[in-house]
């Protein structure tokens, strides 16, 4: 049996958002080493602040400053910090109710070990040396034995307020395509396209998933399909993707390879984008050393009749 493949993958994108007056004041305050919350109609102070009362749903704008000291309400020890986390050595995730606040703020606590952390311990903010108006302006919390619980009055007005943030989102994981798709990928390395036939409905699925999506039964019989196929439907791409060296516009299509009962997708080349059409007969084009087709090009055959591929739309 061919080796089952696996590879590290990362899904990453920057999330850009604008800030309303409350979040703008909160993040700008962090830049100035001031922690702001909002006061609700019933007198509670919420930190981090929200724009609408979680009980009444009324809009709230009454900003109030709280102290940089507080109390740990609960915690969990992080033995192995991951990329992008506040500290690169083991630390505790803590919920801290800052003095003057009625809710808790989640952040990191720099402590020598889990035995040094407890619910009810006193902590204070350790500010980042360089601050830009982000939650990372709080470098972390640190244990604190002092009595300073000063709460200052602040209107929440600053020069050059922060009006937007870019929050990077990233997910790192190890992906394994499983037995069926590993065999499919190994075959592509030999410039062959292999699917699997369902023992019940006899349909051939490419790429294979190891089970028939219609019948739900396991598949194992391999069937080589292609190398030619038919464009069943397509779209014209007009926006250039980052790190993709393809000039726009170009065509991305669903292609039903001969002998397959499921269309796969691929880029169409070798023809002007405005001449691609449903029923166009195409074949794979490989580049030197590639493990999959670079694109599909017209074969020069007459277009397939609609009835030949309508079930694959």
Image: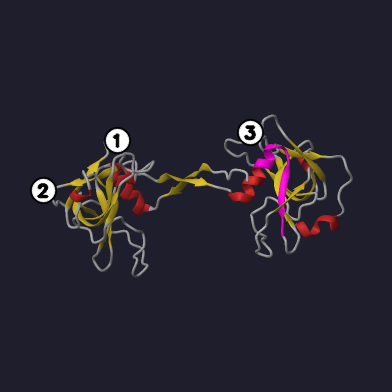
The magenta region covers: 186-198
Q: Is residue 217 magenta?
A: no
Q: Position of residue 234 (x, y in %)?
A: 73, 49
Judged from this view, the residue extending furthest toward the top is 288
Crowding near pointer 2: few (<14 within 10 Å), some, many (20+)?
A: few
One can see residue 98 in this view = no
Crowding near pointer 1: few (<14 within 10 Å), some, many (20+)?
A: few
What is the secondary structure assignment of the residue under circle 3?
loop
- Considering depth in this image, is 233 or 226 the residue closer to the camera? 226
Q: Earlier in the sequence, mark 1 or mark 2?
A: 1
Residue 302 appears left or right of 108 = right
The image's mark for residue 245 is 3
One can see residue 174 in this view = yes
- Considering depth in this image, is 222 or 46 the residue closer to the camera? 222
Q: CA distance from mark 1 to mark 2?
A: 25 Å
Q: CA distance from mark 1 to mark 3?
A: 37 Å
Q: Position of residue 220 (x, y in %)?
A: 68, 54
At x 27%, y 46%, the residue is: 91
Q: CA distance from mark 2 to mark 3?
A: 58 Å
Q: Earlier in the sequence, mark 1 or mark 3?
A: 1
* Contact? badges 2 and 3 (CB < 8 Å): no
On the image, numbered disc 1 is attached to which residue? 130
Q: Earlier in the sequence, mark 2 or mark 3?
A: 2
At x 65%, y 43%, the residue is: 185
Residue 165 appears left or right of 266 = left
Q: Position of residue 290 (x, y in %)?
A: 67, 33
On the image, numbered disc 2 is attached to which residue? 146
Quadrant showing the C terminus: bottom right
What is the secondary structure assignment of the residue under circle 1?
loop
Colouring scheme, one of rainbow, by chain, secondary structure, one colour: secondary structure
């Amino acid at each position: 049996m061919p080796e089952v493949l696996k590879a590290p993958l990362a899904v990453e994108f920057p999330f850009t958002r604008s800030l309303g007056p409350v979040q703008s004041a909160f993040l700008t305050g962090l830049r100035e080493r001031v922690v702001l919350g909002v006061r609700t109609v019933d007198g509670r102070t919420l930190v981090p602040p929200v724009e609408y009362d979680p009980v009444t749903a009324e809009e709230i704008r009454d900003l109030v400053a709280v102290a940089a000291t507080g109390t740990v309400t609960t915690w969990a020890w992080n033995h192995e910090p991951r990329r992008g986390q506040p500290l690169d050595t083991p630390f505790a995730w803590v919920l801290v109710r800052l003095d003057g606040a009625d809710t808790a703020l989640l952040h990191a606590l720099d402590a020598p070990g889990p035995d040094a952390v407890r619910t009810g311990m006193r902590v204070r903010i350790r500010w980042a040396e360089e601050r830009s108006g982000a939650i990372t302006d709080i470098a972390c919390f640190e244990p604190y034995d002092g009595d300073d619980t000063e709460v200052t009055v602040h209107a929440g007005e600053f020069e050059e307020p922060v009006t937007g943030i870019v929050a990077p989102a990233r997910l790192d994981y190890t992906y394994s395509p499983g037995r069926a798709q590993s065999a499919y990928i190994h075959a592509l390395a030999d410039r062959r396209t292999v699917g699997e036939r369902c023992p019940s409905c006899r349909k051939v699925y490419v790429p294979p998933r190891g089970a028939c999506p219609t019948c739900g039964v396991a598949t194992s019989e391999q069937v080589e399909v292609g190398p030619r196929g038919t464009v069943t439907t397509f779209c014209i791409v007009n926006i250039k993707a980052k790190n993709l060296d393809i000039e726009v516009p170009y065509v991305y299509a669903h292609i039903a390879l001969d002998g397959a009962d499921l269309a796969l997708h691929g880029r169409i080349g070798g023809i002007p984008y405005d001449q691609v059409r449903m029923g166009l007969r195409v074949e794979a084009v490989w580049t030197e050393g590639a493990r999959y087709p670079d694109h599909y090009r017209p074969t020069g055959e007459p277009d397939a009749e609609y009835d030949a591929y309508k079930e694959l739309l």
